[in-house]
Image: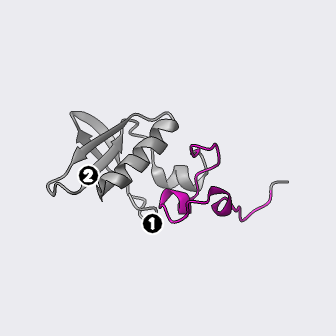
Amino acid sequence: MALNKGKHLVEEIDGVRCTVVEKGITPERAQFLKTLLELNGLEVKTAVEADPATMKLGVTDILFNPVIDVYERRLKSPSGKKVTPAYWLQESENESESEVNYWRKS
């Protein structure tokens, strides 16, 4: 699921109802997301789509919504920092650079 689309999709993957996190992704992207989501305590399911070069990735927690969890900074990266949209989309490898808040804690 792209971060600019908030539609919550639930489909069966390997016989289990899952929230679809992303569809039509490369195996490398699927591995990145699987590692990140499992680190955050989610059970991940993957399936090869009709085009063998693409995959579908989902989590068994049907209430999980990646858009909400990324923007509310609920997810942690392997180094323990908050996952930002730039990190989720793999636009920035430098986690500290992308962990800029637009507000200040009082």
Q: Can you identify the residue that label 2 sits on?
A: 55
Q: Which residues are the magenta region? A: 76-104
Residue 95 forms part of the magenta stretch = yes
Above or below, comparing residue 18 to residue 82 in the picture: above
78 lies above or below 72: above
Residue at image location 60% in from the left, 52% down from the top: 72
| Helix, strand or loop: magenta stretch | loop
Quadrant position of the N terminus in the picture: bottom left
Who's the residue at 57% across and 56% down the image?
A: 71
| Image quadrant where residue 5 sits | bottom left
Q: Amino acid at mark 2?
A: Met
**Is residue 21 something one can see in this rendering?**
no
Foreground residue among 69 and 97: 97
**Residue identifier under label 1:** 4
**Secondary structure under badge 2?**
strand
Residue 20, given in percent of the width and then of the height, sits at 33, 48
User: Which image quarter: residue 59?
Assistant: top left
Instruction: Tell me if residue 37 can be seen.
Output: yes
Residue type beneath disc 1: Asn
Please say if the residues under marks 2 and 1 sit with CB atoms less than 8 Å apart: no
